[in-house]
């Protein structure tokens, strides 16, 4: 699904969307859950992108439905892999996830990548700004590229409406609100979540922060 001239949702990654940014250096945002790697390569092929033409893979956070094909895609693309300093130990099996996520990671196993590095200190990769938005996980980040904000699991959409993620899946829900306030300060037109379809920004973001439409489950 084309979002802008340079941004595509990779259609095979239903339920936990990964995105492609086309540019001088092509970039993947997240990698879906285990088993979706070949679908991602097919999506790329349909856009005339060879695996080796992916220069960077950026990870929003450590959940298994976002890092599920990291090792596979690392091999296929030889891309540079980036994630937050805080979430890398979970991705590399050096730290155990908390709560439900611990059990989910037993049921849904992921392979660790060979090379993964923390985002650069200036928080910029090829025109993309890394915005730390902790809460869903300790090192969750959003990515801003021109007028598109990739929000990972900071929030989701359902039938075109912004919604909170389940609090039971958050590492620390009290931080989520601060992270939402933080992104609200930025200028962007599109919100691209992992769960649910992209939506154009409207005042729902502010309503979500105000709690009026807060649906904590
Ligand atoms: Zn997720």
Image (cartoon, rainbow, N blue to C red):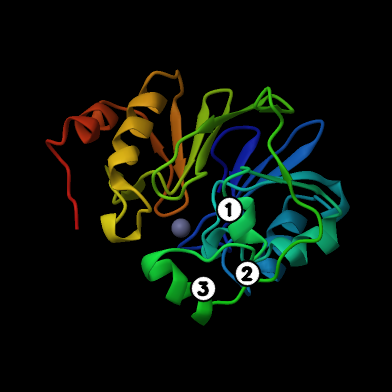
Above or below residue 204? Residue 198 is below
In the rendering, at what x and y percent does residue 85 appear? Answer: 63, 43
Cβ–Cβ under 8 Å for marks 2 and 3 = no
Question: Could you tell me which secondary element the residue under label 1 belongs to?
Answer: loop
Nearer-the-camera pick, 85 or 50: 85
Question: Could you tell me which secondary element the residue under label 2 belongs to?
Answer: loop
Disc 3 Cβ-to-ligand 1 distance below 8 Å: no
Nearer to us of marks 1 and 3 is 3
Above or below residue 147? Residue 162 is below
Picture quadrant where residue 8 is located:
top right
Disc 2 Cβ-to-ligand 1 distance below 8 Å: no
Viewer can see residue 100 = yes
Q: Circle 2: is it few (<14), some (14-19), or many (20+) Cα within 10 Å?
A: some
At horizontal 56% and vertical 58% (from top left) the residue drawn is 66
Label for residue 32?
A: none
Cβ–Cβ under 8 Å for marks 1 and 2 = yes
What residue occupies the far left of the structure in this picture?
212
Task: Answer with mark 1 or mark 3, whichever residue precedes in sequence.
Answer: 1
Label for residue 36?
A: 2
Disc 1 from disc 2: Cα separation: 10 Å
181 relative to 193 in the view: left or right: left
Disc 3: which residue: 105
Above or below residue 76? Residue 163 is above
Disc 1: which residue: 18
In the rendering, at what x and y percent does residue 113 appear? Answer: 75, 61
């Amino acid at each position: 699904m084309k979002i802008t001239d340079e941004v595509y949702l990779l259609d095979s990654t239903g339920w936990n969307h990964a995105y492609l940014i086309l540019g001088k250096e092509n970039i993947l945002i997240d990698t879906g859950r285990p088993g979706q790697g070949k679908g991602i390569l097919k999506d790329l092929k349909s856009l005339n992108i060879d695996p080796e033409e992916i220069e960077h893979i950026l990870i929003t956070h450590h959940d298994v439905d976002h890092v599920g094909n990291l090792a596979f895609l690392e091999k296929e693309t030889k891309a540079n892999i980036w994630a937050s300093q805080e979430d890398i130990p979970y991705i590399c099996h050096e730290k155990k996830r908390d709560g439900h996520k611990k059990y989910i990671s037993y049921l849904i196993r992921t392979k660790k990548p060979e090379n993964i590095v923390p985002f650069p200190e200036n928080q910029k990769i090829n025109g993309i700004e890394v915005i730390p938005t902790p809460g869903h996980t300790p090192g969750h980040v959003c990515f801003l590229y021109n007028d598109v904000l990739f929000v990972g699991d900071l929030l989701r959409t359902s039938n075109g409406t912004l919604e909170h993620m389940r609090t039971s899946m958050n590492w620390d829900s009290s931080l989520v609100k601060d992270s939402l306030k933080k992104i609200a300060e930025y200028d962007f037109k599109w919100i691209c979540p992992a769960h649910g379809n992209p939506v154009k920004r409207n005042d729902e973001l502010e309503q979500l922060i105000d709690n009026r439409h807060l649906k904590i489950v």
